[in-house]
Image: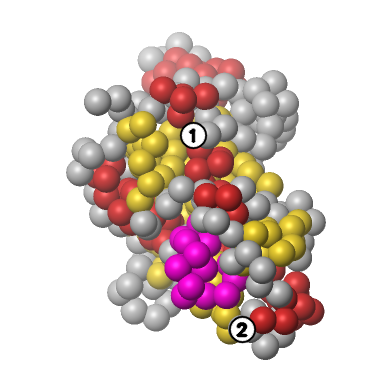
Amino acid sequence: MPASYAYLGPEGTFTEVALRTLPESATRELIPYVSVQSALDAVRNGEAEAAFVPIENSVEGGVTTTLDELVAGKPLTIYREVLLSITFALLVRPGTKLSEIKTVTAHPVAQPQVRNWLRAHLPDALWESAASNADGARLVQEGRYDAAFAGEFAAERYGLEALETGIHDAENAQTRFVLVGRPARPAAPTGADKTSVVLWQNDDHPGGLRDLLGEFATRGINLMLLQSRPTGAGIGNYCFCIDAEGHISDRRVADALMGLKRICRQVRFLGSYPRADIKPGEAAGPTRPGTSDEEFMAAADWVARCQDGRF
Ligand SMILES: O=C(O)C(=O)Cc1ccccc1
């Protein structure tokens, strides 16, 4: 059996389209799962080599199911990320008119991307969430809903017709997807990388979050995502999902992680992987003076010489 990648299915999701842009997907069996949880469980229990799931949307923010799965349970690691521009089509059973649509469905992350369109064109339609956009299309095929917001490409797969295409409230809406596997050595740095971590504060004190963020700021590390998630231990109890620029093999990133490890109750490393928004060589590199690898190494060397009496 070839190595397999699990993904948020069924066939015809944006997730599948994004997955197929990864060259390595051509050599894997791609297996649809009904939910993010079941795709990630397939990795945790060894059924699949890796899972491909949505994690962030430029309109709605973090995909909370995915973040919560990465925050808790058996540790998983992000290997790769993919960005996909998203516009929706309104899919209906052939012959359905706009005036006949009473119920619509799609993945909950799709709703904020089509809300204005719905208000303008189908103000009285009842919205219900589907497990994925393609699953919404499947439910329309089965007659459970009148219309689904999904990729235009899903129409053929589910015998539907696109009544409208190019639906998007926000220009250039993008969704970010990640390939997640069991913990492994991160891929070598490309020069344009990202590091994801989850942080749990040691105690509740004024400026606690500022202390965590300060570990990045003093080392000139830009943050690309900061999302708090409830720990489940009561109101006001949160952990923080953070994406930071750079690779764990960059001295400033490793040093920041060491700083966080010393002051946090728990740090979960979620991986260092190539950025999808820019190509290697396009990254600005450390802009804050004193934060390059060379400067970190020279400083460590100087301390060693002082300890040795050779200053
Ligand atoms: O991949 C899909 O089709 C999904 O259901 C997840 C999703 C939701 C909204 C935008 C992009 C992907």
What percent of the width, then of the height, locates residue 261? 37, 46
Residue 133 lies, with reference to residue 85, above or below; the image says below
Q: 255 or 97, which lies in front?
A: 97
Residue displayed at 66% across by 72% down:
96
- Residue at image mark 2: 102
Residue in front for this viewpoint, 179 or 294? 179
Q: Which residues are magenta?
A: 133-149
Q: Residue furthest top?
A: 310
Classify mark 1: helix, strand or loop: strand
Is 283 a magenta residue?
Answer: no
Q: Amino acid at mark 2?
A: Lys
* Circle 1 residue: 80
- Quarter of the image for residue 239 reads bottom left
Q: Nearer the viewer, mark 1 or mark 2?
A: 2
Q: Using the numbered discs, state the Cα–Cα distance from disc 1 to disc 2 in whole angstroms.
A: 40 Å
Question: Is residue 311 placed above or below 128 in the rendered structure?
Answer: above
Residue 246 at least partly seen: no
Residue at left offset 76%, top offset 56%: 166
Residue 158 in view, yes or no? yes
Which amino acid lies under the numbered mark 1 shown in the image of this protein? Arg
In percent of width and height, residue 236 lies at: 42, 77
Local SS, label 2: loop
Quick one: quadrant of the N terminus? top left
Mark 2 neighbour density, 10 Å: few (under 14) some (14–19) many (20 or more):
some
